Image (tube, coloured by chain):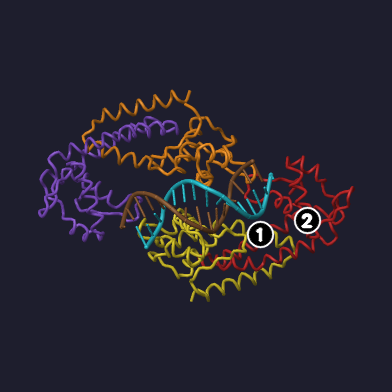
Chain colours: A purple, B orange, C red, D yellow, E cyan, F brown
Amino acid sequence: MNNTYQIDNQSRKAVYEQIIEQVERFILAGLLKPGDQLPSVRSLSIELNLNPNTVQRAYSELERRGVIYTITGKGSFVDEKAREVISSEKRRELPQLFETLKEFSAAGIEKQEILDIVNYAYMASKEEQD
Amino acid sequence: MNNTYQIDNQSRKAVYEQIIEQVERFILAGLLKPGDQLPSVRSLSIELNLNPNTVQRAYSELERRGVIYTITGKGSFVDEKAREVISSEKRRELPQLFETLKEFSAAGIEKQEILDIVNYAYMASKEEQD
Amino acid sequence: MNNTYQIDNQSRKAVYEQIIEQVERFILAGLLKPGDQLPSVRSLSIELNLNPNTVQRAYSELERRGVIYTITGKGSFVDEKAREVISSEKRRELPQLFETLKEFSAAGIEKQEILDIVNYAYMASKEEQD
Amino acid sequence: MNNTYQIDNQSRKAVYEQIIEQVERFILAGLLKPGDQLPSVRSLSIELNLNPNTVQRAYSELERRGVIYTITGKGSFVDEKAREVISSEKRRELPQLFETLKEFSAAGIEKQEILDIVNYAYMASKEEQD
DNA sequence: GTGGTCTAGACCACT
DNA sequence: GTGGTCTAGACCACC
């Protein structure tokens, strides 16, 4: 796992959302810790060959959520409560998981197959953490 | 559970995608069986207060996927292989489930909590089936 | 090869065109000879479970082309010049074959592969003739 | 050979299909290469005096097939695998060629005449390529 | 600027 | 009546 940002222009996901996701992923993975400085809007926009507006939008949204904070003239930094904020965001996705799983069931996908995937995912996640 | 169509204008999901999802859900739930006729483009567009084009687009996509077939001048009908097609569509979503679960793990959501949701979802789905 | 009519409701081809094609094919195959009587509009529409209008339309078009002729009150019969007419219809499709073949070439399909198909098709056709 | 788009309003082929065919033809002819940008939906609709929806529909279908990819807000571009995709589409038409040839045979068109057309078509295609 | 979606309403071929 | 296509024109998100 590396901590350099990447964007997939061909993805149907908006570019600014891809940036948000990656910042949050780096935080969850411990690659970015509270107080750490994020790349500046300008440098990241150059690195990723993006319009600065796009990067700015991602940072603004992250700040709105309380994941980072910005000190004008100094830069953007990971908030103390970042992990907490991200976790509660993810938790809000659980009801949708429930709906998805009901559809898998209706589609005839065996419960055991899902349970296996859960186990693999949790194993894989713990390994990446190390 | 009823089999009348509903659309949510607030949703960020495209209306035509909502129609597709509902048709597929009705089929999985057994409310629409192979050979059954779907509401005509016109009648559904009136019922949902939509433009015929929007309904037409949903039906075209369902036909392209092999979920329904259309006889010009007669109507649209559930394909014999509809369930099969939908199941394989769903199965293609499993890798994304894997990614989502890894994120839940990284976000500190306990595996047991996920397993509970899986169990609930499969119970709920089986009940709706009856 | 049999000479009973069949229609494919799910085909994208119009039903009346399917009838036309089959009549012409039977004539080319020698299953229908000049002077032979075609099934009546009514009986064919019942046999194929079609609206009589649809069958009528096919017969009218065949008459217009000179493939069959109709004697009111007696029925429809294969015209003496039927084969000739159908052949010249087919011959008019040759320029389109030319275009199709150019596209196959551009798509990287080898000429030899096409030549093989031509040979097979002519062999198969001669066999069915017997 | 030029690479400007043209539509034939008289044709019974749908306009959006004509656009699809032309884009694919330009790609096969090497006039459009992977990564090349297609005219924007708006500009092409103006150039051809069509409604933007019609062009949009063609582009959507091309994207679904994997011939082009689209970056919302930036434009549509020829996919790396475009030729591959188009070739396999064409190859799927071969069985229909077989049927057509059988009919030509039954219609009394000499095999030699067909072979000549194949040769001409392959010659013509190679020349256009240069 | 770009594509994505939708409404409104029309015409056509076919059953 | 049914679906298939198209025009005209609008609004949105994103770059």
User: Residue C109, image x and y in percent?
Assistant: 53, 64
Tell me the quarter of the picture where residue B42 sits: top right
Classify D89 as above or below D125. above
Q: Which mark is residue C62?
A: 2
Q: Looking at the image, can residue C130 be seen?
A: no
Classify C21 as above or below C103. above
Tell me the quarter of the picture where residue D105 sits: bottom right
Query: What's under tag 2, amino acid-wise?
Result: Leu
Is B31 left or right of C20, judged from the image as shown? left
**Which chain is mark 1 on?**
D
Q: Nearer the viewer, residue D56 or D125?
A: D56
- The local crowd at label 2, few if under 14, some if 14 to 19, many if 20 or more residues have their Cα within 10 Å, is many
User: Residue C77, image x and y in percent?
Assistant: 85, 53
Query: What's under tag 1, amino acid-wise?
Result: Thr
User: Residue D64, image x and y in percent?
Assistant: 45, 53
Residue that carries the numbered disc 1 in the rendered image: D100
Q: Nearer the viewer, residue B127 or D130?
A: B127
